[in-house]
Image (spheres, grey):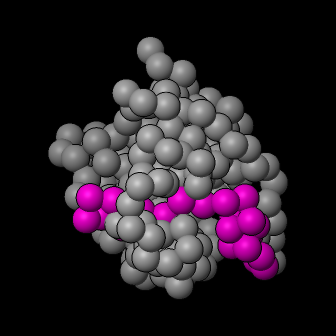
Amino acid sequence: MKSDDRWLEKWYPTIQGKAVLELGCGKGRDTSKLARVAGELVAADISPALGLGDLARVLQLDHSRRLPFPGCTFDVVIASLTLHYFDWKTTGKVFSEIARVLGDGGNLICRLNSNRDIHHGAVGHPELEPGLYSVNGQLKRFFTKSDIEALMVEPWRLVELHHRKIDRYEKAKLAWEFCAEKSW
C-alpha cells in the first residue's frame, strides 16, 4: 500500500459523522475511505466512475460551474488534486462556490499541485498565465504558497498548510495539502 492511500486518515476527526462533498471523486480512490467515516457523502466528478453508488450519492458535475446545492449544505468539502484545471479567475470562483455550499465553521480539505512538481507539468510546458500551463493540451495550474494564501481570504481561515511529497504515481508528485475553515 502506498502512503498516499492513507492521506485522509489525518482528517478523519474533521470528517467523522459529517455531511461531506467530495469534488473530483474519479474512480472512487478516496470515496471508499470517506464513506466509512462521513455521516452523509456526495461524490461528484465531471465523469464519475461507475459502481460508486453503493458508497455515496454520485453526481456528474463540472465543479467550475455553480454547484447544484443550496447554501450551507455541507460540513466538509474534500478536493484532492482536482481544483487545478482552471485559469485564475475561474479558480477564485470555484473557491467562492465551495464556501457558498459549506456551512459556517465548515472545512475545506484540499490538495493542489505545487509549483515545484517538476514530474507532472510545472516545467517544460507553455505557460498561459502565471502558474497555468498547457500540459499536453490540458490546462494545469501549479500553486505557490502565496497563491493559496491569496485564495484563503474572507470567508476562509487557513487552519493548516503543508507541502507534501505524494507517492500516488510512478514519479513523486509534490502538492500543497491544507485545511481551511469557512468563518463568517
Residue 117 within the magenta-colored segment of the rendering: no
Q: Is residue 21 visible?
A: no
Residue at image coords 56%, 74%: 130
Name the residue furthest front: 124
Q: Is residue 22 left or right of residue 97?
A: left
- The magenta segment is 135-155
Residue 42 image point, x, y percent = 41, 55
Placement of 125 over or under 71, stated as above or below: above
Residue at 62% across / 68% down in the picture?
Answer: 102
Residue 166, located in which quarter of the rendered image?
A: top right
Q: Is 112 above or below relative to 104?
A: above
Residue 7 vs residue 137, the one in the foreground:
137
Compared with 88, 107 (above or below) is above
The residue under the point 50% across, 38% down is: 173
Query: What residue is shown at x 44% (from left), y 70% (from top)?
Result: 127
Residue 113: percent from left, percent from top: 53, 52
* Quadrant location, the C terminus: bottom right
**Quadrant in which the N terminus is drawn:** top left
